[in-house]
Amino acid sequence: MPLEEWFDNYQYETEYDIGETGVKYLNSTAFAGNLGNVELRYGHHRGSPELRTLICEQYEELDPDQICVTTGSSEANFAVVTSLVGGSDHMIVEHPNYPSLYEVPRSLGLDHDLFRLRYDQNFELDVARLEKLMKSNTKLVSLTHPNNPTGSVKARKSYVVCS
C-alpha cells in the first residue's frame, strides 16, 4: 500500500511522527523488571484460550469458540472481508480511510465502491448518498468513525440502511 511504503521510507527519519499509531523506537529494555519466561513463538491461531474466555465474560450468550483475536486491525479487516464477501457480492468502503479497508477488496478483485466523504460536507456521513451506492448484492458496508484521517465523527443519530 502506498501509505505503508511512505512510512517505510520516512518514519525512521522524523523525530515526531504524528501519523503513526504505534510507539516509536520502543524495545524490551524500556520495560521495567525481568520479562522472565515470555515465550517468543506463534500462539494459538484464534487467540489465547484464556483471553477468549475473558472476552466472553463481557458478553452474554457467547462462548470462546465464537471469538477470534487478531494481531491488529489489518488482520481483522482481512478476516471480516474474506469471510463475509464472496465473488458475487458487493461492498461499500468509506473513503478516505485506512488503506487496507479498500485495498483488501481491490486486491481480491471484489466488486466494491468507495463512499467518498466530502470536504464541502465537513466529511459527514451522508446517508442519502450512501443509499445510492447500495445494490441488491451489497453484503458489507464499511464505515469508520471517528474517521481517520478526517476526524469526522458520526452524528448522534441512529441510521438504518436497508436494501
Image (spheres, rainbow, N blue to C red):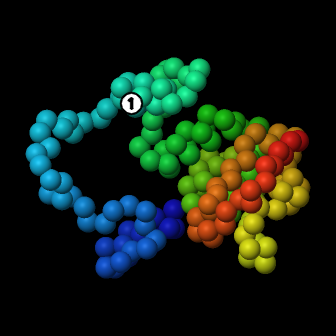
Left or right: residue 147 versus residue 21 is right
Percent coordinates x, y for residue 30 in the rendering? 18, 59
Q: Nearer the viewer, residue 161 or 87?
A: 161
Q: Quadrant of residue 78?
A: top right
Number of numbered callouts drawn: 1
Q: Is residue 58 above or below residue 40?
A: above
Q: Residues within 10 Å of mark 1 (few under 14, many from 20)?
A: some
The residue positioned 47% from the left and 22% from the top of the image is 64
Percent coordinates x, y for residue 98 in the rendering? 57, 60
Q: Quadrant of residue 60?
A: top right
If the image is split into quadrants, where does the C terminus sit?
Answer: top right
Percent coordinates x, y for residue 16 in the rendering? 35, 78
Left or right: residue 50 versus residue 31 is right
Percent coordinates x, y for residue 86 in the rendering? 70, 36
Q: Is residue 9 visible?
A: no
The residue positioned 24% from the left and 36% from the top of the image is 41
State the SS at label 1: helix
Residue that carries the numbered disc 1 in the rendered image:
51
Amino acid type of the residue that numbered disc 1 sits on in the rendered structure:
Leu
Q: Is residue 2 visible?
A: yes
Q: Is residue 39 above or below residue 111?
A: above
Q: Nearer the viewer, residue 6 or 67?
A: 67
The residue positioned 82% from the left and 39% from the top of the image is 137
Q: Is residue 152 above or below residue 84?
A: below
The residue positioned 25% from the left and 61% from the top of the image is 26
